Amino acid sequence: MPVSKRIYAGLLVVLATVLSVFPILDVYDDYLQGEPLWLTLAENSVPLALVTILFVATYWMYRHRERIHLSMVFRWSIAGIFGIMFILAWVLGIQSFQQEFKPVVAVTHTAIGGALAGSAVGYTAARVRRSRAEIATEKSRWESLFQNDPGGVVDLRFTEAGPIIDSANDSFERLFGLESDEIEATRLSAAVDHGDRDIEREITESITDGEMHAAEISTEIGDEQKFFKLRVVPYGIGQNQQRAFAIYTDVTELRETEAELETQMHQLEASNERLQQFAYIASHDLQEPLRMVSSYMSLLETEYREELDEEAQEYIDFAADGANRMQDMIDELLAYSRVRTQGKEFSETNATAVLEDTLQDLELRIDESGASVSYDELPTIDADRNQLGQLFQNLVENAIDHTDSPSIHVGSQRRDGAVVFSVSDDGQGIPESQQETIFELFKRGDRDGDGTGMGLAICDRIVSRHGGEIWVESDEGAGTTFYFSIPE
């Protein structure tokens, strides 16, 4: 267990007292023998003055310095005493053996010991001076960092009244609109309104526990609401370990931008919802007049076919075909609008089982087209089972519609935290200029033929709802592969 500061101070007082006894006794003895008092006091004035200095220095160090100062002074004092006494004892012992007292030799030997002690003290003083110079350099560096930090920084010391500001940089004064005389030696809570007592309690605990702490505060400065990131970084100096830097970083613009983005997101979601409702209502309401057109065209063809010439019958066929195409487009527009509004909750879905059910539903189309479909063992994912089946159906039908007797393969691989599915065919391929537009509404590529251009747009919307991406890789004449990812 280390010796306390009080004990070292007591030992130095005892040492100074013992050393002062001998000069005092000499003064008293000379006085009894009739020597003039002033003379005997003059004789012992130097040692008595040095002992007095030792008393005063001990008291000052006890009040104003740390334990290590008292410890080093006491140890060096003991070393000096024993060193000088050893030299005197050696010289006097040798001279007694020689039965001859040589004052010059005694003084010279003692001077040599004093020179050695002075050298040790001088070397120590030089090291202290060098250390002070290094400390001054480091202090200058830290002060430069402190003053030029873009964040508001305050140096805190902990007292019974709470964290007290010792100093603050210019950024802190600017951020909180304060003057230097309003900051130094004031409580942190008086300079900054943290808006929450828990924040101030956490700052206190961070300093007393010596642990870093981070928080975000909101406060009013003038007429403005400001947001700051707060970091408390404890550190210690000597015996006073309860100190810390509090660093305030202005994040007001960031929070305002986030609030604007959130508002825009809500507006976008509301707008998107209205557009979906519009698409559903418009497509739903269009079906009734379209059915009427189809019915009357069918009736016209049935009732008056024999009375119409070939050109009129061709016009009727064109009109009926247009009505059917319009019906297909309305149906797919409805399907597109329902992807989000009528989607099911995500659940664990065996993709292999979904693909097998889809291929069973497409069995007649596959047989008629002469297509062959192969697939790997697919993983289980978190998805809407019905929409995953629609994805597979649209992509397989896309290959069947645009390739004669295609060979289709469905595979998957795990990549960057997602399952990437692939649907490949050996058809004519898609020109590079069309590969980025084929997923847009009513966009049809060269190989889309009579399609509505909605199938791939629906695929894109389904994948987007699942948080993934869809893309195509194709070389003309070398087949096409559609990829879509579903996060795991």
Image (cartoon, rainbow, N blue to C red):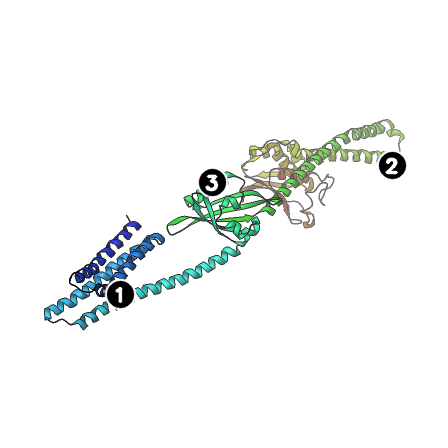
Total numbered badges shown on the rendered structure: 3
Q: Quadrant of the C terminus?
A: top right
State if disc 3 and disc 2 touch (CB < 8 Å).
no
Observer able to see residue 26: yes
Label 3 – label 1 distance at C-alpha = 53 Å
Judged by depth in the image, the label closer to the viewer, 3 or 1, is 1
Residue 311 — which label?
Answer: 2
- Of residue 94 and residue 480, the one placed in the foreground of this image is 94
Helix, strand or loop status at disc 3: helix
State if disc 2 and disc 1 touch (CB < 8 Å).
no
- Of residue 280 and residue 251, the one placed in the foreground of this image is 251
Which residue sits at x=48%, y=57%? 143
The image quarter containing residue 483 is top right
Q: The disc labelled 3 sits on which kind of residue?
A: Arg
Apparent side of residue 316 relative to residue 43 in the rendered image (left or right): right
- Of residue 309 and residue 243, the one placed in the foreground of this image is 243
Label 2 – label 3 distance at C-alpha = 91 Å
Q: Position of residue 473 (x, y in %)?
A: 63, 47
* Mark 2 burial class by Cα count in 10 Å: few <14, some 14-19, many 20+: few
> Of the residues under marks 2 and 3, which one precedes in the sequence?
3
Residue 117 — which label?
Answer: 1
Q: Is residue 387 above or below residue 136?
A: above
Q: Position of residue 440 (x, y in %)?
A: 70, 42
> Of the residues under marks 3 and 1, which one precedes in the sequence?
1
Q: Position of residue 122 (x, y in %)?
A: 31, 66
| Residue with the mark numbered 3 | 201
